[in-house]
Amino acid sequence: MNMQAMMAQAKRLQADLEKTTKEIEGKTFIFENENVLVECLGSNEVKRIEIKNNDILEDQEMLGDILVVAINDVLGQIKAEKEKKLGRLTGGLGGLF
């Protein structure tokens, strides 16, 4: 493969990576159970936290634990989506992005 073809392929890959990254960053990921609803954007920005069960407000330790689980779940969803979609483009170099 000549240098020009390699450069063209690299530019296409870069464009695809940028497009896919923007799509993921704009997507909303959700964790919901009977106690809370947590929404985060694919950019790891927390968009919304809703307490659905007011009884957990009385137990701050339980509320904290529930929120940690919810946020970690949403962040895990985001990571999995990035690995799935960007991994196809990078051929295993996804950890670099």
Image (tube, helix red, strand yellow):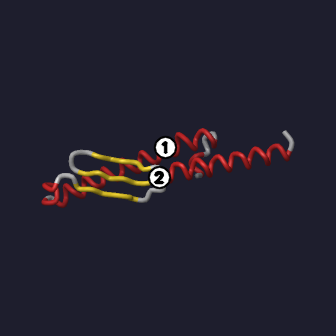
- Relative depth, front residue between 18 and 92: 18
Question: Is disc 2 placed on a helix, strand or loop?
Answer: loop
* 14 sits to left or right of 52: right
* 36 sits to left or right of 56: right
Identity of the residue drawn at 51% across and 49% down: 24
The mark found on residue 42 in the picture is: 2
Q: Quadrant of the N terminus?
A: top right
Circle 1 is placed at which residue position? Answer: 81
Question: Is disc 1 placed on a helix, strand or loop?
Answer: helix
The location of residue 71, given as percent across then percent down, is 34, 53
Are the two marked residues, 2 and 1, in contact with CB atoms closer than 8 angstroms? yes
The location of residue 72, given as percent across then percent down, is 36, 51
* 54 sits to left or right of 39: left
> Where, by quadrant of the figure, is residue 47 drawn?
bottom left
Identity of the residue drawn at 60% across and 41% down: 92
Amino acid tagged 2: Gly
The location of residue 52, given as percent across then percent down, is 21, 52
Measure the alpha-carbon separation of dots 2 and 1: 9 Å
* 9 sits to left or right of 69: right
Identity of the residue drawn at 15% across and 56% down: 54
- Ranked by sequence position, the earlier of labels 2 and 1 is 2
